[in-house]
Image (cartoon, rainbow, N blue to C red):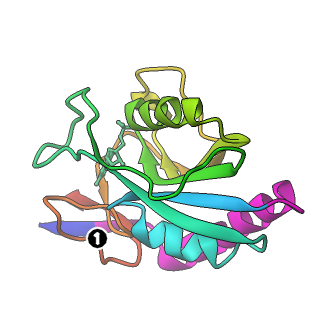
Amino acid sequence: MQVKVLISAEEIKKRVREMGEEISRDYADKELVVVGILKGAFMFMSDLVREILVPLEVDFMATSSYGHATKTSGVVRLLKDLDTPIEGRHILIVEDIVDSGLTLAYLTQLLQPRKPASIKTAVLLDKPERRRNEFEPDYVGFTIPDEFVIGYGLDYNNKFRELPYVGYVSG
Ligand code: 5GP
């Protein structure tokens, strides 16, 4: 199995810095709760929060993964909820990739009744061709074609998350 580089570690670093600057401008004078979606977002989230200059807290949620499949089953299951109450707070959900859009639509709908001051989403990767709903992330690192990607937090069978770049499997 060969892995081809789609987005290098240097490109990711540069783009994550730009995203952090944009988020810092948008939330100037505010405080954030940055919510990472486990496990895929762990690397992007840890780099992104270091580039955000407003005071923030971190929390995590986990949803069911595809398991061994590379296509969504269409059903999202919550495996871990937030530890923090979010009423009146500004929430930034951080996710590795938006594909069908089902996960982030589900999570924003789940959090909305808790009355946060605002909810926005930041994703490293967006595959708009695959969308099955109207979901649009607020901050996007890279728009990519419909290819199954791995690395920088993203897995295949729970492997390859540690790669410092985003790649795809060929051969
Ligand atoms: P959605 O609910 O938008 O279809 O999918 C979101 C989740 O699907 C992501 O958090 C990720 O776990 C998984 N996913 C979607 N596309 C890919 C991909 O190309 N590679 C990997 N490793 N996971 C993906």
Residue type, numbered disc 1: Arg
Q: Is residue 99 above or below residue 59?
A: above
Span colored in magenta: 4-30
Would residue 165 be seen by someone viewing this image from the given angle? yes
Residue 100 seen by the camera? no
Q: Residue furthest top?
A: 133
Q: Position of residue 167 (x, y in %)?
A: 34, 64
Residue 5 within the magenta-colored segment of the rendering = yes
Identify which residue is drawn at 45% across, 37% down.
107
Relative vertical location of residue 140 with respect to residue 32 in this rendering, above or below:
above
Q: Residue furthest right?
A: 29
| Vertical order, 15 against 46 (above or below) | above
Q: Position of residue 19 (x, y in %)?
A: 70, 62
Which type of secondary structure does the marked residue at label 1 adopt? loop
Instruction: Please state if 54 lies on the left or on the right of 28 as rendered.
Output: left
Q: Which residue is mark 1?
A: 161
Instruction: Please say whether residue 132 is one of the residues in the magenta stretch.
Output: no
Q: Nearer the viewer, residue 164 or 73?
A: 73
Image quarter (top left, top right, bottom left or bottom right) of the N terminus: bottom left
- Quarter of the image where the C terminus is located: bottom left
Q: Is residue 90 left or right of residue 133?
A: right
Residue at the (64%, 50%) spot, across then down: 91
